């Protein structure tokens, strides 16, 4: 029994310029490099996590031009000229925690912390895009991010506390 | 040594936010794969694609031709010999099958080769190009297949586990009513969000630094001592953050040895991260089980006899029993019991503990059975459990008194918070509009395991306190509770306490499993911190220049970062005491032996061996208890059960941190929901292939699957466990919850499903 030998894909390298957390970056990358591996292995921005590498867990969620993206399914080279934001950029001046980060701590919205950067990026987007009107809406919006420690009720409480102003809808 | 008076508790028991929280939300907590090591090469593991047989040949020419590829290793590579490992859990199950020792394949997904390259992309690409020829053999990939018998070599036949008391067969004959049923639970995979990873860096021929996410610092050094003859003290394991473990990071797996070998061959540091699919093959699983009951009730509805035939799957060469019969042995009053637990070999790789091993699947069978029996006896499920409650002074299995048992109060408080009294007994009788509502409940129980423990407390020159323990925080809140304990013992602000964990050079501790860390390591930290306080007090009392000179030790209290005579300003700061000694820091190291343990346990621990004090000692049966209540809502047309509400009340001893303990309990309860409705590993019996080895097809709950979850904690310290009275919170939440949900599904639909997960097809 033999398993088939795959055709070798192109393994050439190409240049890439993008902005990561406000810093202009110029890189030369294998064409198949994902944005996630580029962040973690080449830029040493390891806040963004790899939980599956297949777009199934949400741990690698980042913002590309303000929109949530799964960085494991994003080819790095497709980010030419774009602006990427990761969890490392959430804290403000002098390292002050973003309200969502503070709320995650206050409500114990994580245990092992591995899904947390992805949860935070989605949670920030949940509130910013106006999807935090009710617990049900938050649960729905946040369902692309797995948490094996199952901090789900605590995550909902954290997002709600930040969304506060968005008001309660049935 | 001086003894002292009070040290008020400010942090212990309170709702304290995780001290490692800021690092985690900033993305600054460094997990294994994230350590920056110079000159790092990247490895990709290659897994077998047959379930049993032999590798004829691994062709690696195409792989080696990929630019950046450094090497390909397999059993064909000379010089990779490893010696066998003995003793569990440092050895088997994880090292039951050592990598690259011969061309034998014993399960699909077994690591058979590794490709190392300059970049991850190159290694991944080259791994696809290996040309592997197999000579496949017959195999048994599942529990069901294993029942057909094991016609293969078996060097160590699994033993049967047995328990017998009274005369069960006679009592069954005499019983007023009898009932028979079987319950099945499937293979499940731990799937912590962080995948297994290793960075191995050699320093010369005989010293090694290892980064790996582990629930046991001492596992890899012990395994490497046996396999490669290294001095375990020369293996430095670094693991400050672990992205979830749930049992599968408590042993050493073959990929660690592969990484170590690759780093040795290449003469440079190597990093290997498993893929999610490999997390389903090479790092253990919860074995499938079946529990078959024959039960007799007397005329009053009390258990008269229980006959339990249990089966659990195990791997092709290892012997880890999923102890599915344990809960049935002790949870209810019953004088007549026969239990036989048989292990069945499969070509599925070694199985291993997964959150509440034994108790989680065992309680599914037992607690659904209790629901069925209650109905037969014409009693409310809660009333039926109360009727069969085992009294506080007699554990049915050992005959010993319980160390501390408040199960009846769990029933009461859980039922009240849930509103159980409003339940109508008839299945299908509760509705919200057209939606069927079901209410079910179950009892939870978990044994109290403890270990000897060691810790160091240090006063630094700037007044900060450092706590050192070679233990682990796998999301369980260890950093936080140890900081709380130390802050209280020393009367300092919690912000002044730094806790160091996850380093094999720190004082040795046991593995973090079986809910033992809080109680065991907590006790050692308490001893070290109070020891530090007492030694500093001795120094102050004995120094003529100290304002405390001549004071009575019992009058002292620790507060405001120093020692003071109670109710007065007479005293001084620790830093002043330290300065007087002329030293720049002051350490106190302590070792603790838990109640029921011995010096021998401590000695074993210090040698890096497993050292566990069992739940039942000579004098007491020590268990945590709980009661779980579940509400499901079922669409009458689509038959999709959703858990809208869960209430659990738990008797887990002293609660150290109400916030983190509650999260562990609710997390565990959600694992129970997952077991009830979602989680199952599907293995194709014809190929041994796991059909859903990814997080889209292996279902675990997402946020929208989970409704309200409430965990009530009784907070009665159990001083027969330790001076702190802690019993641990990590596992008990999952126990019973799957059954509570299953019983609720029955109550909603009238359909009794005796197998998890309860998916749509089983309700049609
Ligand atoms: S790592 Fe990208 S979705 Fe899981
Ligand atoms: S906190 Fe552990 S996976 Fe979410």
Image (cartoon, helix red, strand yellow):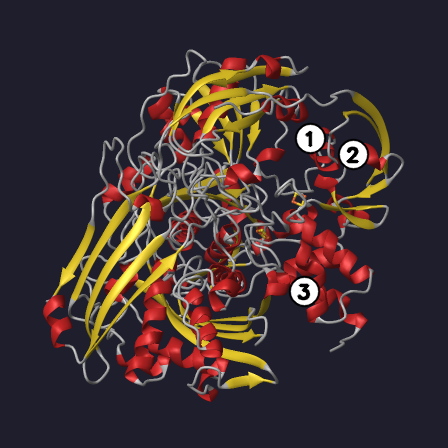
Find the residue positioned furthest to the right.
Answer: A81
* Residue at mark 3: chain: A
Estimate how packed mark 2 is, as few (under 14), some (14 to 19) or many (20 or more) residues with alpha carbons within 10 Å.
many
Residue B317 visible in the snapshot: yes
Task: Respond yes or no on whether mark 3 lies under 8 Å from ligand 2.
Answer: no
Task: Respond yes or no on whether mark 2 lies under 8 Å from ligand 1.
Answer: no
Residue B542 visible in the snapshot: no
Viewer-nearest of labels 1 and 2?
A: 2
**Apparent side of residue A23 relative to residue B655 in the rendered image (left or right):** right
Mark with earlier residue (1, 2): 1
Q: Which residue is found at the position 44% from the left and 14% from the top? A: B76
Compared with A29, A139 (above or below) is below
Image quarter of residue A38: top right
Measured in 3D between alpha carbons, the distance from the residue under mark 1 to the one under mark 3, in whole angstroms, is: 32 Å
Residue at image mark 2: A76
Q: Are marks 2 and 3 on the same chain?
A: yes
Measured in 3D between alpha carbons, the distance from the residue under mark 1 to the one under mark 2, in whole angstroms, is: 12 Å
Image quarter of residue B507: top left
Residue at image mark 3: A139
Q: Name the secondary structure under disc 3.
A: helix
Task: Respond yes or no on whether mark 1 lies under 8 Å from ligand 1.
Answer: no
Q: Name the secondary structure under disc 2.
A: helix
Viewer-nearest of labels 1 and 3?
A: 3
Compared with A117, A73 (above or below) is above
Mark with earlier residue (1, 3): 1
Percent across and percent down for residue B508 are 39, 39
Residue at image mark 1: A41
Compared with B752, B485 (above or below) is above
**Apparent side of residue B509 relative to residue B674 in the rendered image (left or right):** left
Compared with B153, B653 (above or below) is below
């Amino acid at each position: 029994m033999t398993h088939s030998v795959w055709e070798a894909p192109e393994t050439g390298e190409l240049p890439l310029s993008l902005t990561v957390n406000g810093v202009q970056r110029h890189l030369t990358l294998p064409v198949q490099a994902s944005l996630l591996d580029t962040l973690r292995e080449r830029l040493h921005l390891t806040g963004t996590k790899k939980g599956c590498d297949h777009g199934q867990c949400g741990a690698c969620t980042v913002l590309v031009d303000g929109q949530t993206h799964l960085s494991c399914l994003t080819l790095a080279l497709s980010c030419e000229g774009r602006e990427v934001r990761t969890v490392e950029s959430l804290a403000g001046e002098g390292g002050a925690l973003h309200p969502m980060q503070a709320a995650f701590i206050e409500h114990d919205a994580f245990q092992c912390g591995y899904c947390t950067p992805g949860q935070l990026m989605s949670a920030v987007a949940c509130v910013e895009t106006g999807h935090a009107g009710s617990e049900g809406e938050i649960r729905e919006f946040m369902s692309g991010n797995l948490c094996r420690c199952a901090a789900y009720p605590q995550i909902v409480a954290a997002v709600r506390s930040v969304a506060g102003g968005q008001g309660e809808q049935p | 040594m001086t003894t002292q008076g009070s040290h008020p508790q400010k942090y212990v028991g309170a709702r304290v936010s995780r001290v490692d929280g800021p690092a985690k939300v900033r993305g600054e907590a460094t997990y294994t794969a994230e350590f920056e090591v110079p000159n790092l090469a990247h490895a990709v593991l290659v897994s077998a694609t047959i379930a049993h047989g032999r590798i004829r040949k691994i062709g690696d020419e195409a792989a080696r031709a990929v630019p950046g590829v450094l090497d390909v290793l397999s059993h064909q590579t000379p010089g990779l010999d490893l010696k066998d490992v003995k003793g569990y859990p440092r050895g088997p199950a994880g090292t039951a099958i050592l990598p690259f020792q011969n061309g034998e394949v014993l399960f699909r997904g077994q690591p058979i080769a590794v490709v190392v390259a300059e970049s991850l992309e190159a290694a991944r690409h080259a791994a696809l190009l290996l040309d592997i020829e197999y000579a496949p053999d017959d195999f048994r990939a599942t529990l069901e297949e294993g029942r057909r018998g094991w016609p293969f070599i078996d060097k160590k036949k699994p033993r049967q586990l047995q328990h017998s008391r009274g005369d069960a067969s006679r009592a069954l004959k005499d019983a007023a009513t009898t009932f028979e049923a079987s319950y099945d639970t499937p293979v499940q995979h731990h799937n912590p969000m962080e995948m297994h990873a290793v960075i191995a860096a050699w320093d010369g021929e005989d010293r090694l630094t290892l980064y790996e996410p582990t629930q046991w610092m001492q596992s890899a050094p012990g395994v490497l001592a046996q396999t490669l003859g290294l001095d375990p003290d020369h293996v430095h394991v670094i693991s400050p953050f672990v992205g979830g473990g749930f049992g599968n990071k408590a042993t050493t797996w073959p990929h660690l040895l592969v990484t170590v070998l690759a780093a040795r061959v290449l003469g440079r540091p190597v990093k290997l991260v498993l893929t999610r699919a490999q997390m389903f093959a090479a790092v253990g699983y919860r074995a499938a089980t079946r529990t078959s009951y024959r039960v007799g009730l007397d005329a009053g509805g009390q258990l008269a006899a229980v006959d339990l035939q249990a089966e659990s799957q195990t791997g092709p060469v290892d012997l880890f029993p999923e102890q599915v019969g344990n809960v049935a042995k002790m949870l209810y009053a019953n004088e007549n019991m026969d239990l036989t637990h048989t292990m069945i070999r499969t070509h599925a790789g070694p199985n291993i503990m997964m959150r509440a091993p034994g108790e989680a699947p065992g309680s599914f069978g037992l607690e659904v059975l209790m629901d069925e029996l209650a109905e037969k006896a014409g009693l409310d499920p809660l009333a039926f459990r109360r009727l069969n409650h085992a009294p506080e002074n007699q554990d049915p299995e050992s005959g010993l008194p319980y160390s501390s048992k408040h199960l009846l109060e769990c029933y009461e408080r859980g039922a009240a918070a849930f509103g159980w009294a409003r339940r109508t007994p008839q299945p299908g009788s509760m509705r919200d509009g057209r939606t069927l509502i079901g209410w079910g409940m179950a009892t939870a129980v978990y044994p109290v395991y403890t270990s000897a423990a060691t810790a160091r407390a240090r006063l630094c020159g700037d007044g900060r306190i450092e706590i050192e323990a070679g233990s682990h925080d796998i999301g369980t809140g260890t950093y936080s509770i140890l900081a709380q304990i130390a802050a209280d013992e020393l009367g300092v602000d919690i912000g002044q306490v730094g806790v160091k964990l996850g380093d094999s050079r720190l004082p040795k501790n046991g593995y973090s499993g079986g809910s033992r860390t809080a109680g065991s390591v907590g006790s050692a930290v308490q001893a070290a911190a109070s020891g530090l306080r007492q030694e500093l007090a001795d120094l102050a009392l004995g120094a003529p220049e100290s304002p405390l000179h001549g004071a009575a030790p019992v009058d002292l209290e620790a507060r405001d970062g120093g020692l003071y005579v109670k109710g007065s300003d007479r005293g001084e700061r620790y830093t002043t005491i330290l300065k007087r000694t002329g030293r720049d820091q002051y350490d106190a190291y302590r070792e603790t032996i838990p109640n029921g343990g011995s010096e021998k346990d401590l000695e074993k621990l210090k040698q890096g061996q497993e050292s566990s004090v069992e739940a039942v000692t000579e004098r007491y049966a020590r268990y945590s208890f709980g009661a779980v209540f579940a509400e499901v809502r079922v669409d009458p047309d689509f038959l999709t059960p959703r858990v809208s509400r869960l209430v659990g009340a738990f008797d887990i001893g002293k609660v150290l941190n109400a916030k983190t303990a509650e999260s562990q309990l609710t997390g565990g309860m959600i694992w129970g929901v997952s077991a009830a409705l979602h989680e199952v590993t599907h293995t194709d019996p014809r190929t041994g292939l796991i059909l859903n080895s990814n997080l889209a097809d292996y279902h675990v709950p997402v946020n929208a699957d989970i409704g309200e979850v409430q965990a009530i904690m009784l907070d009665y310290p159990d001083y027969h466990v330790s001076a702190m009275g802690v019993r641990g919170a990590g596992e008990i939440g999952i126990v019973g919850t799957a059954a509570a949900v299953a019983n609720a599904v029955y109550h909603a639909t009238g359909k009794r499903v005796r197998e998890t997960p309860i998916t749509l097809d089983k309700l049609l």
